[in-house]
Amino acid sequence: MALRGQGVSVAPQLHFAHANGFPIASYRQFLAPLQNAAAVSVTDFIGHHPEFPVSDNWFHLCNQLIRDVETVVERTGQPVHGIGHSLGGGLTFMASLQRPDLFRSATLLDVPLITFWEATVFAVLKMTPWRDRVTPAGRAARRRSVWPSQQAAFDYMRARALFRQFPDSVLWDYVQAVTEPVTAADAGADSVQTQGWMLRYRPEIEADIFRTYPTNWVRHYRRRHPDLQVVIGAETSLVRPHHVRLMQHKLDIPVYQARGGHLFPLEYPELAADQLLTLLGLPAGHSPQPAAGVAYG
């Protein structure tokens, strides 16, 4: 789905894929500066399309992203700068392995490339109930999904640690993106009455995505896209120091830091967008900082 550049365009092509549970509209303030500098297309509501269901190692989800990028490349004649946050970054990494011809570059936002031993252990654990303990799947499956109003949803999320660093305006974007009205038709009437608001991004799908995290990446690290880079949140709890060492020192992948945690594109959207544009050589106002020697040595 194209946000800009519906016709043939010479503008740089960016393709963005979102994190698990955070639809594209949540990123409105992050995407706005990107749209000012390039034509932006997206992959949205990952896991919710019947033709691309959740499956082990995200096989079908990757195909969804490839399909979306193919559409852009066929229309414009240009490969894209692939950008993905968390889940979206993992899928961008996978798609750039399978179809490097579609990508000018690949930028992963707070995505850990796990070690061989981590992959081996999780390949076993994800076949057991332990998968809900070693991933966020258990919490996702149990998360509250209905509120009496969007204001009630906002107030509930405002108090949650996950959203603590979100500006109010970004949190409202998220609430509006992720909820839809629960309706019931009045008996004998054509009108529809709102009974509350529920999550559009279904918790059971979000949980299944966590449960099926790919463990086959490690076999393909050496044939990664030549223009691959990673940006991590300076306060991330997901990408650990040993992941950074693996990416920087063993795989020779540039790793940069951005202000914020795992959700930094939503915590500091304009700053994150400007730093990303600088990395891609497009007009921007801030420069990213290399991770080496800053936090991980």
Image (spheres, helix red, strand yellow):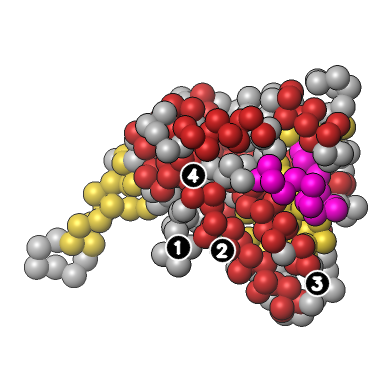
Are the residues tagged 1 and 2 within 8 Å (C-beta)? yes
In the picture, residue 290 is in which quadrant? top right
Residue picked out by circle 1:
49
Q: Is residue 215 above or below residue 16?
A: above
Q: Going 60% across and 35% down the picture, which residue do you hit?
A: 119
Residue 111 in the image, given as x and y percentages of width and height: 67, 39
Residue 5 in the image, given as x and y percentages of width and height: 73, 72
Q: Is residue 244 left or right of residue 92?
A: right
Nearer the observer, disc 3 or disc 2? 2
Q: Is residue 28 left or right of residue 53?
A: right
Secondary structure at numbered mark 3: loop
Residue 92 is a magenta residue: no
Residue 66 in the image, given as x and y percentages of width and height: 63, 65
Residue picked out by circle 3:
78
Q: Which residues are magenta?
A: 217-231
Quarter of the image with the N terminus is bottom right
Residue picked out by circle 4:
212
- Which one is in front, 34 or 109? 109
